[in-house]
Amino acid sequence: MSTKDTVALIAGGVLVVSLFGTAKSTRATGVNNADTVSMGTSPLTNAGGTRPGLAPITSGTDRAAARKLISRLRVKGRGPATGYARTRYGDNWADTASGVPYAGNGCRTRDDLLTRDGQDVRYRKGSRCEVVAMRLTDPYTGRSIEWRKSRADEVQVDHVVPLAYAWRMAATRWPMSKRLNFANDPLNLLPVDGAANEQKDASGPAGWLPPRRRIRCAYVTRFAQVALKYGVPVTPADKQAMLAQCR
């Protein structure tokens, strides 16, 4: 059957409808729901990082839960950047991390994340991994981005807790295996608007927050989840800024 056809199949009372020319792959996530992807997932229900996107945290109950999570963070002064290099965390988008989702599946981490968060994902002919086109609803700006690999930098995969930040706060003492996991953990990775990601650079929440105010509590909650998982302290100013976003 042509992939251009719209197919409705009623079986056992279940209606299955294909609306796209090529179905979004469920290789990385097991999720094939355009509404879920476009809205994103609250970090409070996505502790493993395998569900797509980043949804705002809006209810009083959820914001209180976010503050409770953030309050668990240890604080310390920012250490020196001496010795930092991207290679301290292994090769870019390595598939060799041993302790995180998607690792060892034969696909680069970046492509796994584009598959997780993108809509109408297209792959290079003959590949089950290499994403060449998709649509992304960027959580940081709210933009809908029609992305093509020919404009690769228009979408960048952000480390929510930046690698350089972690280096200055804790990672100098980590074994390479932990650094590799940190750099490739989907909990710490979000495909976002490239310009916004470049503005962020290696800043903590006291120095940079997403332009879209409605997403800021969710962003700092995700930051806290990653920091707690890997034992990364934050600066006092960063913790104060994080708590302020979820009042």
Image (cartoon, rainbow, N blue to C red):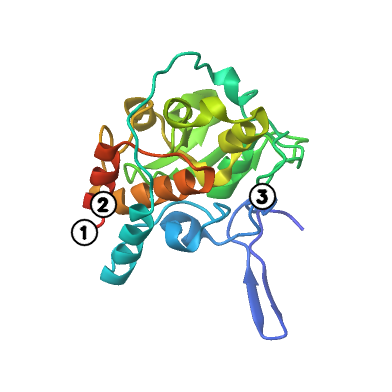
Q: Is residue 34 above or below residue 134?
A: below
* Quadrant in the picture for the C terminus: bottom left
Q: Are marks 1 and 2 in contact (CB under 8 Å)?
A: yes
> Height in image: 81 above or below 199?
above
- Give the x, y percent position of residue 15: 63, 77
The residue at which mark 1 appears reads as: 247
Query: Residue at 34% across / 35% down in the picture?
Result: 76
Residue 218 rendering spot, x and y as whole percentages? 35, 53
Q: Residue furthest bottom?
A: 13
Instruction: Identify the amino acid type marked 2.
Output: Leu
**Where is mark 2, residue-wise?**
243
Q: CA distance from mark 2 to mark 3?
A: 32 Å
Q: Amino acid at mark 1?
A: Arg
Residue indicated by mark 3: 28
C-alpha distance separating marks 3 and 1? 34 Å
Secondary structure type for disc 2: helix
